[in-house]
Amino acid sequence: MPTKSFLIQKFAKLQFGNLHLIGYSVAGEETVVQVPEMNVCFDIGRCPFFALTSDYICISHGHMDHLAGLPYYLSQRAFQGMKAGTVFVPREILHDVDTMLKCWRNVERQGTPYNLIGMSPDELYEVRKDFGIRALATHHGGPSLGYALISIREKLKPEFAGKSSQELAALRRQGVQIQYRIEVPMVTYLGDTSLGTVFDHPDVQNAEILVTELTFFDPSHQTRAKAGKHLHVEHFLKVFPKLKNPNIVIAHVSRRIGMRKAKAILRKRIGPEAMSRITFLMDFEGASDAGEVETAGPESRAD
């Protein structure tokens, strides 16, 4: 009976309303999480094929399991005739990442285009009038950021409700501000982080979808969590009461624990009702092989 090669990699496909998460995240191996409807990929891992379709890449920090595929992403997009990718990185590593990409240009003997943007905590990059990406300070080894995908909306101020369109237009011509701005966090991604003030940020607590690491579950692994600046389940239990998110996605689980056991430990601690808000990215119940997911990528172009 034929068996699948151990080299076949599966990527999760999760749906939350009108949004999907496609990705893979195992501690120390690879992390890449795409929100295709918002044209964004959080981290790039080893650049699976589907990630090429995202114009915006949000790099959380400089560790290889989150960053390694970046030169390939940019080179392959150029090869496929796609526009240059825009890459956000912590401002402190901007120069080093730029140097790395320029080295790859020299190695490949081609001028691979890219847009590299350094981000600082709480900085908002407005992709469009109605959509922005905000950087959040996280707590990992070296410079690290999380990112929130923000829906930007304009609402009519209550005092102008009931006025006709002609009256509102006249007020605008007079320079009156008749609208106020609302920023709604749709998806927030924390990358790698330990316990800290990032969990007090409104974009973390109120996002429709929160993607957070939770690396360790075994009681004996708290020292490992501290050394690596990762979350242990005991840390997560401290911040969970603050989280108002209808959907929480757990990523970056260590291979030191099985998925079934990790879920059982968390369910026992928070109860089945609270557990209904939580999805483990790498649970793989109903997941698709990489080959199925990767049909979302661009069509291959002949040499």
Image (cartoon, rainbow, N blue to C red):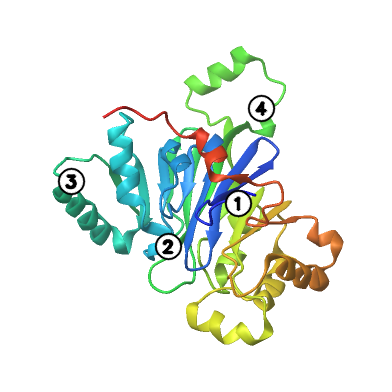
The residue indicated by pointer 1 is 3
- List the single residue furthest toward the top: 166
Side of 284 relative to 96 (left or right): right
Q: Nearer the viewer, mark 4 or mark 1?
A: 1
Q: CA distance from mark 3 to mark 1?
A: 37 Å
In the rendered image, which quarter is residue 260 located in? Answer: bottom right
The residue where tag 4 is placed is 160
Distance, label 2 to label 4, CA atoms, is 52 Å
Kind of residue indicated by mark 3? Glu
Is the Cβ of the residue at disc 3 closer than 8 Å to that at disc 4? Answer: no
Q: Which residue is mark 2?
A: 65
User: Is the residue under label 2 in contact with that under label 3 (CB below 8 Å)?
Assistant: no
Q: Pointers 2 and 4 in contact (CB under 8 A)?
A: no
Task: Nearest to the eye among marks 2 and 1: give it.
Answer: 1
Residue 90 falls left or right of residue 198 = left
For label 4, the SS is helix
Task: Place residue 218 in its image quadrant.
Answer: bottom right
In the image, residue 213 sits, relative to residue 51, either above or below, namely below
Q: Contact (CB < 8 A) between labels 4 and 1? A: no
Q: Amino acid at mark 1?
A: Thr
Is residue 110 found left or right of 167 in the rendered image?
A: left
Look at the numbered disc 1 and give the secondary structure of its residue. loop
Find the distance from the CA under tag 4 to the CA under tag 1.
67 Å
Q: Amino acid at mark 2?
A: Asp
Which residue type carries mark 4? Phe
Task: Determine if residue 61 is in view.
Answer: no
Q: Secondary structure at mark 2?
A: helix
Q: Nearer the viewer, residue 93 or 14?
A: 14
Of residues 26 and 98, the one nearer the viewer is: 26
